[in-house]
Image (spheres, rainbow, N blue to C red):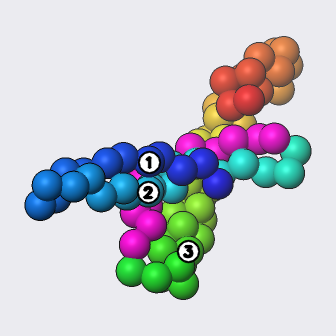
């Protein structure tokens, strides 16, 4: 997971906050999430949100890929693949 760290001033001191912004596969592929997920209210809670956003993000990417495949001309080169890689 890629985390974004920020400091928020509160009552004379800075409070550090973290947000999940991307996921990284074991092969090094990086998927930027559709929305940032704040790491707050217990790890079980925000991990559920990360899982939900992962599914939403991958669904959106796969839908775009499927639409691209339907539009491609099978006699042309595979240049449409470059758009999604």
Q: Which mark is residue 18?
A: 2
Does label 3 or label 2 sit earlier along the sequence? 2
- Which residue is under mark 1? 5
The span from disc 2 to disc 1 (Cα, nearest Å) is 5 Å
Q: Nearer the viewer, residue 50 or 1?
A: 1
| Quadrant of the rendering where the N terminus is positioned | bottom right
**Badge 3 vs badge 1, beta-carbon distance below 8 Å:** no
Within 10 Å of disc 1 (Cα), the crowding (few <14, some 14-19, many 20+) is few
Please indicate, yes or no, whether residue 1 appears anywhere in the rendered image: yes
In percent of width and height, residue 37 lies at 43, 61
What residue sits 51% from the left and 56% below the top? Answer: 20
Q: Count all numbered tags in the image, as a single digit.
A: 3
Instruction: Write down the quadrant of residue 80 in the picture.
Output: top right
Does label 3 or label 1 sit earlier along the sequence? 1
Instruction: Write down the quadrant of residue 36 in the picture.
Output: bottom left
**Badge 2 vs badge 1, beta-carbon distance below 8 Å:** yes
The span from disc 3 to disc 2 (Cα, nearest Å) is 13 Å
Q: Secondary structure at mark 1?
A: strand
Residues drawn in magenta? 28-40
Does label 2 or label 1 sit earlier along the sequence? 1
In percent of width and height, residue 82 lies at 74, 21
Dominant SS in magenta: strand
């Amino acid at each position: 997971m890629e985390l974004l760290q920020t400091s928020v001033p509160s009552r004379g001191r800075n409070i550090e906050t973290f947000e999940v912004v991307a996921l990284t596969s074991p092969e090094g592929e990086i998927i930027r999430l559709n929305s940032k997920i704040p790491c707050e209210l217990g790890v079980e809670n925000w991990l559920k949100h990360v899982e939900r956003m992962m599914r939403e993000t991958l669904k959106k990417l796969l839908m775009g890929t499927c639409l691209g495949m339907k539009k491609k001309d099978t006699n042309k080169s595979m240049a449409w693949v470059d758009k999604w890689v």
